Structure formats: structure tokens, C-alpha cells
Image (cartoon, rainbow, N blue to C red):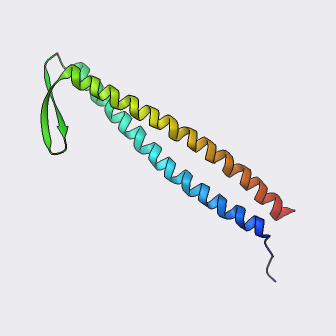
Amino acid sequence: MAIEVPKKAREDVEKLQQYQQQLQLLTMQKQQLQSQILEIEHSLEELDKVIEGDVYEIIGNVMVKKDSDSLKNSLNDKKQDLDLRLSVVDKQVDKISTKTSEIQKKVMKMVKG
């Protein structure tokens, strides 16, 4: 004998699965952003060790000679952009996590009740 699952419960389970997929994608995106930020921080640390002068930046398949200060400024700008994007992703993760737990609780009540 099969258990009859209410239509609302099935819809909520589908929503829950969608939210879990979104969380998974956002988590991967967050990890990528954190990795890029870490890479930039390491680059900035190495640039701080360089006594003033020219350095090289790889852009695509080309290595370009640059002034170390302009490269530092460029990297700091990129880092700020990534930090902002990371904070947006964090907020999305929090929002979806909250929705996910609310739906989980609702589904559990339906199943038990």
C-alpha cells in the first residue's frame, strides 16, 4: 500500500530540490571567488617584496611589462570587485539557506502530521 503524498508536499519538495541545487551552484561560485581573491592577495604580497621598478603581467597569451605600482592598483581594484561579488554571493547563500530550512520544516510537519 503506497502512502499518498499531498500535492502541496510534493511541490514543496520540488522547491526544496531547486533551492539545494542553487545552494550547490552558489557554493561553487563562492569557492571560485575565494580562490581568485587568495591568488590576488599572494600576488600583492609578492609585489610588495619587489623593489620599485618594472614587473610583468600575463594577459591572455602575452606577457606585458608594467610599473609595479600600476599593477598593484589594478590588482587591488580586481580584489575589491571580487570582494563585493563574494559578499553578494554570501547574502544569496544566507537567503536560500533560510528558505531551504523553512521548507524542510514545513515538509517534515506535513509528513509527520
Decide: is 104 above or below 2.
Answer: above
Q: What's the residue at 45%, 47% (across, down)?
A: 29
The image quadrant that residue 67 belongs to is top left
The image quadrant that residue 107 belongs to is bottom right
Decide: is 91 above or below 74.
Answer: below
Decide: is 8 above or below 39.
Answer: below
Q: What's the residue at 68%, 49% (across, down)?
A: 99
Which residue reaches farthest right?
113
Residue 70 locus on image (x, y percent): 22, 22
Q: What's the residue at 29%, 28% (across, down)?
A: 75
How many numbered marks have been drawn onto this rendered protein structure? 0
Residue 27 locus on image (x, y percent): 50, 47
Residue 4 locus on image (x, y percent): 81, 76
Residue 5 locus on image (x, y percent): 78, 72
Decide: is 4 above or below 42.
Answer: below
The image quadrant that residue 63 belongs to is top left
- Of the 4 image quadrants, the one containing the N terminus is bottom right
Judge from the rendering whether residue 48 lies leftward or rightward of residue 53; answer left or right. Answer: right
Q: What's the residue at 26%, 23% (across, down)?
A: 72
Judge from the rendering whether residue 7 lies leftward or rightward of residue 50; answer left or right. Answer: right
